[in-house]
Amino acid sequence: MTSAALEDTASEQPLWPRVRGWLALAPPNAYAVRFAVAVTLAIWIGKSSGLVDNNPNWIVITVAFVALPTTGSSLAKGILRAIGTVAGAFTAIALYGLFAQQPPLLMVGFFLVQAIACYGYTGSRGQYAWFVWAFTTAIVLWNAMSSTTETVEVVAFQRACMVLIGIGLVTACDLVFWPVRAETALRAALAGRVEELRQALAAHARGSDDTSASLRPSAGLQQGLQLVDALRAEWMTAPSVVAALARLPLLLESLASSARALVGSRDAAAREDSRTEEDTLFDRIDSGMAELAAALREARPSAPLADPLRSALLACEAATSRPLRPDAGYEAREGRLAILRELVTTLVEALRTLSMEFAAPAVAQGSPASPGLRLDPFRMKTAMRVGAATVAIVLAVMVLDWPTNSLVVPTAFLAAVPTRGGANRLALSFSITVAIAWLVADLLLVFVMPYLDRAPLALVPAFLCAVGFAKLSVGRPVLALLPSLGSVLVMLSVYGGPRAPTDVYGSYNTVCYLALAIAVGFGLARSLWPATAATLFRKRIALQLQSCAGALKDAPATSEWVQGIAPQSIQTAALDGQASAEPLEQGLDAALRARIQALVLDLADAIPRERPQAFDAARARSAERWTPLCDALDREKNALLESLQRAARALGGADEAPSSALVDARTEVEQRLASLRATASEPVLSASERQDLLRALDARRRISSRQQAIEEWLADWQQARTPGRG
């Protein structure tokens, strides 16, 4: 078709689709515009006479901290902020009503609230709601204590109203101005991770060794799991789609785990005549991953997605079913080919599950039984440290006779939480954010605002500043606080109070508050039960293994299990990043941390697919023939549970000796299976029961092999942390 014909075709399209195409923005730009519009509207509402007369700055603060790049993320955070605000308002009313005339008891109650909130904040569910509950209680109490005209009930009501107005502004802007759904962002993030893994494997196939960085658990895992939480908050997304996409971040890291094993075995493949089978498999892997990336980006229907990958799996199985020649390199080549086959199988299983869950409606299943209350000593120490930091900052501001400020308590709270590595990163992010915001605020106050003292021109700098901050923060972790904290610093300094300040003291005062809060929080974080990220990383991995052991007993549904394990994986990934900024502790270097993360994720992905009821059906239908196998499977499950508990205890610091019980139990199961296959008579099972049994056997085999790999990792780690061994 000629260019003229293409122009004619385009000119024949309806006007609105063409206009919409011209006005379309890339997701980062759309986020910047939405954020800027919401911030500007919040300032306009606060500065317009007759609209909001009490504490309008709280609207700006809410907008700055709630607005996020996707609609689902903003909605989820807004809901958590609303819950935390209401809880904090009622808590402040109760504390003030009980202990207003007894300041020591009031401080004790305030300390307990902050400590409990910190314990919840360092957990795995609703962290932001706990955080908001903590600082809302502080803000309402503080304002009520310092006010001579307003009661605590009035302050609490005003705080709740301002927060709800801010959340409403963010939600409205998200729905009107180029909304970006969490599902779209999640698909794009997963497609990027698939492409990253595909390129790493292609480079490895060409002989390059520079692939380890791409195959490590990346920040994309944390981003993907956070987007899964945002996806659940979007009412436009079907539950079956959520269940399908929620599992992919873990599956991709399972794929990366198999790929790392493949890269690590390169030296074992010494002979060139074994490359034919590998090249065939690499071609199939490359085409399958390219198909997955394209399907995720284009959001195509599920049916075209499954067929090419099923064909790829069949071709891979056909290519690897021929026996290799038993020569000197046989074992090494067979091992690499086995890893490659497992890699392809993992990939195709991921896509088959994805297509099935897209096509099938979601089925409501019971959630796994929750464990009893167990207090984590590390979280308890952190909670007491944060309680002490927040009480100290409130007393310090009172002693200095400074006016109340909404930022000091949450800043001290956040500064007191991190480990040593996290504190270093947070200090850097805080410093850069405060420096940029202070500079921008001073430039606006000195060179811009004197000439733009009336709306709407006075709101133009606010809009441009918010756009710039949001745009700069995208893809730059060190500037992640710029849209929230940076915007608050600028907007409160330039637009806060009954009128805009005329000099730089507005921003200077806010910076002084933040500097004092950071100093108090970091000082206590360094001196009061200081924690290292590597230690907490081990503890978190141990908790994940205990959770896996509990899931093996309870047989959770896939969606419930992913929803429970995902927050734990996010925290583990964050601790891994913080540990990189700390000295090596107990031999737990970056490579070992990456390996155990991938192994635990792989194990967690395999657990929900086990179907123990299939074993019960087989035992009931044909007791004589199936009882030996079922008994062997029971012994294997007990060995699995004991292995998981032993690994968790070892990571917790206990001295655990290695055991071969799991290997022996797995060997017995394979022997029973071989004996069953050799029997001439057919089993008395229906086709569906046989299929369920085969799936259950495959799932159990995968779980056992993953746990054996964890035991091998445990041996390597114990050797690495013991000087002089090996």
Image (tube, rainbow, N blue to C red):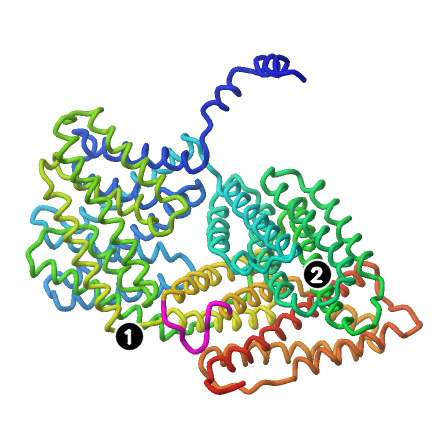
Classed neighbour count for the residue bearing mark 2: other residues with Cα under 10 Å, few (<14), some (14–19), many (≥20): many
Element type at marker 2?
helix
Looking at the image, residue 720 lies above or below residue 176: below
Looking at the image, residue 447 lies above or below residue 549: above
Residue 698: x and y in percent read 72, 66
Q: Amino acid at mark 1?
A: Trp
In the rendered image, which quarter is residue 557 located in?
bottom right
Element type at marker 1?
loop
* Apparent side of residue 276 relative to residue 437 in the rendered image (left or right): right
Q: CA distance from mark 2 to mark 1?
A: 47 Å
Residue 611: x and y in percent read 69, 65
Q: Amino acid at mark 2?
A: Leu
* Apparent side of residue 186 relative to residue 49 in the rendered image (left or right): right
Looking at the rendering, the stretch of residues picked out in magenta corresponds to 582-591
**Label ID, residue 529:** 1
Residue 230: x and y in percent read 46, 47
Q: Nearer the viewer, residue 233 or 409?
A: 409
**Label ID, residue 471:** none
Q: Nearer the viewer, residue 264 or 507?
A: 264
Observer-side mark, 2 or 1, equals 2
In the rendered image, which quarter is residue 50 located in?
top left
Looking at the image, residue 196 lies above or below residue 615: above
Is residue 132 a member of the stretch shown in magenta?
Answer: no
Task: Please give the name of the residue rendered at 19% of the width and 29% of the height, measured from the top-left corner.
Answer: 48
Classed neighbour count for the residue bearing mark 1: other residues with Cα under 10 Å, few (<14), some (14–19), many (≥20): some
Label 2–label 1 contact, CB within 8 A: no
Residue 283: x and y in percent read 72, 51
**Residue 560 visible to the viewer:** no
Query: To which residue does mark 2 refer?
Result: 340
- Quadrant of image for the C terminus: bottom right
